[in-house]
Image (cartoon, grey):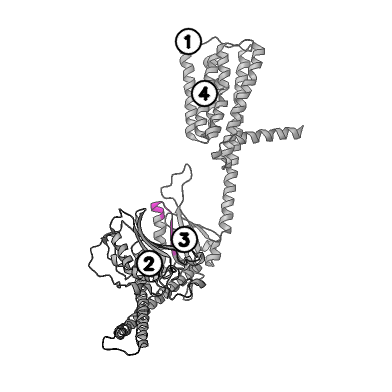
Amino acid sequence: MRVFGRESVSGLAAYFSSLVHESVRGDVLTAARHQSFIASHLLGGLLALCAFPVYLVLNGRPSLFVVAAFLWLLTPIGIAIFLSRTGRFGAAHLASAANFAGLVTYSAWLTGGLSSWLIPWMVAVPLEAALATDRRIVAWSAAAAGVGLAVLAALQVYGIAPPLLSLGLSPMLLALIGAFTATTYAAALAIMVQLVQRRSEGAVRAGEERYRLLAENANDLITRHDEKGRIVFASLAAQQLLGEPAQKILGDGLFECVHVADRPTYLTALSRSQTNGEPIAVEFRLRCGSPGENARYIFVEMRCRPMQPADGEALDRPGIVAVTRDITDRKAQEAELTRARDEAESASRAKSQFLANMSHELRTPLNAVIGFSEILNRELFGALGEARYRDYARLIHESGEHLLNVVNDILDMSKIEAGKFNIVKEPFEVASLVRSCCDILRHTAERRGLTLIADVAPGIPELPADKRACKQMLINVIANAIKFTKEGGWVRASARLARGNVELVVADNGIGIAAEDLPKLGNPFVQANNSYDRSYEGAGLGLSVVKGLARLHGGRFELESTLGQGTTAIIVLPLDGPVESMETPVELKKVSAVSALDRGGAGLAAV
């Protein structure tokens, strides 16, 4: 039987706990208060419901006044349901106090008014409200009880009274029952208040113990500062961080350990956090160990935030809670990363400068080689005699042009990487650009047995961009499509509008590019390394120049390809770019069909 009783109590407790609103289940103390309120009101309403049949047996058919009283006794069930559904503890207590005061007033009116044996129950109204731990609710409940007494007095003065409800007991016995039951209920309320207080104290002690364990076992130093920045509490991590016991950094002890140059920063952070009421993070240096010439300093990061006053407190200048962490290793890593970045940038600048200087030095002799080889090839000053001489002169001329174009690409890449490539944007007609580039390369395509198609969608507005740069990009891409398309194939150059951009598209049915090689293309001096492209010359610069020029316009360069089926290159340029009326010339080379075709590494299939 004892085990059964315990199981029944546990089952009821679990049921009442399940009725607590989900918003307060995480707070043990608040959930216990809600559970106690719901349980007492449900049990009180059920007790009234069970007492009604007993009344019928003892007194027979009840009057309407008695029926109303018993129905009123059932209202606590509705208040309990309201709290369970909404979680509004204060509102539920206010409703309960008003309902309780009204019920006692009505019952006292039925049993004799101010002389009723139920008048002592008025004292229980503010006592029950004390469970809410809110002085405003207690005051409101006392006022409700006072209003009930005033209503009873007014009814008695004006002689408004129903037929007295007779219970068949003597007035003295009824007065004794009223006083005893009210005293018993008040004692039960006092016990509940004591239990809530004890549970509150236990929760506070448990919370303090958890925070103490966290503070003592955390590797970071946790400190509490008063309104003047002095430390009133320091965790045991002070020994690990500073080599000093926590007691030594209390007061101005931590301030004395801050590096002299960083003390204004330290004090400013505490002051701003306290004045503005916001969390602040600051980095400074702290001395480890005793002061002296050989004192060692570490970098720390302190995150401080103002303390929020507890409920019921009114602190004009709350203190500060700070967490200080050693970041010496992180600072060393940052310094190393900064040094490595500076070295990389210096090396990149040196590389770009070297390539630019080398390119300029190579262009002068190359111009002489190309010029004199062309004179020999054309026999401007007389016949060479032997036909092989003309072939040799032609090969020298073609090789010189090829090398000059590689040098020009290197110069372009150097300027793009250094951010010194000037772009002059002016509106121009896209259709004329596409047709002009196709006309330049049409002879070369026909010589290789290819069909070159120009296809421009109608209605394309003028494009605000650098026309010469766009021409260089489009000629590069078309020429390389021709270069990597076999005889009998086709190359299509087109332009279209797409999502507020102009897309210059060059498609072919050439040898294509393997999927694993696509991500590599567009980087300087990078080529696809599969066997299908090893027979083609190239230094790996052409697509990187196209990609860089597109990026300078605020656009992008895309490649889509399938090995053995062909390649589609897309130059995306924005239509909403600003129009600049600058007269600064853009340093772009005039490329011919032959020179563009023979550029090293500028291709759709190999870079």
Badge 2: few (under 14), some or many (20 or more) residues near its Cα, within 10 Å?
Answer: many
Q: Position of residue 505 (x, y in %)?
A: 38, 61
| Circle 3 residue | 302
Q: Indicate which disc residue 138 carries.
A: none
Nearer-N-terminus badge (1/4): 4
**Of circles 3 and 1, which is in front?**
3
Mark 4: amino acid:
Ala
Mark 3–mark 1 Cα distance, whole angstroms, equals 75 Å
Q: Residue at x 44, y 63 (%)?
A: 509
| Circle 4 residue | 101
Mark 2: amino acid:
Ile
Q: Position of residue 207 (x, y in %)?
A: 57, 48
**Of circles 4 and 3, which is in front?**
3
Nearer-N-terminus badge (4/3): 4
| Circle 2 residue | 478
* Residue 283 found in image quarter: bottom left
> Do residues under tags 3 and 2 come within 8 Å of each other at their CB atoms?
no
Mark 1: amino acid:
Gly
* Residue 200 found in image quarter: top right
Q: Which residues are magenta?
A: 273-283
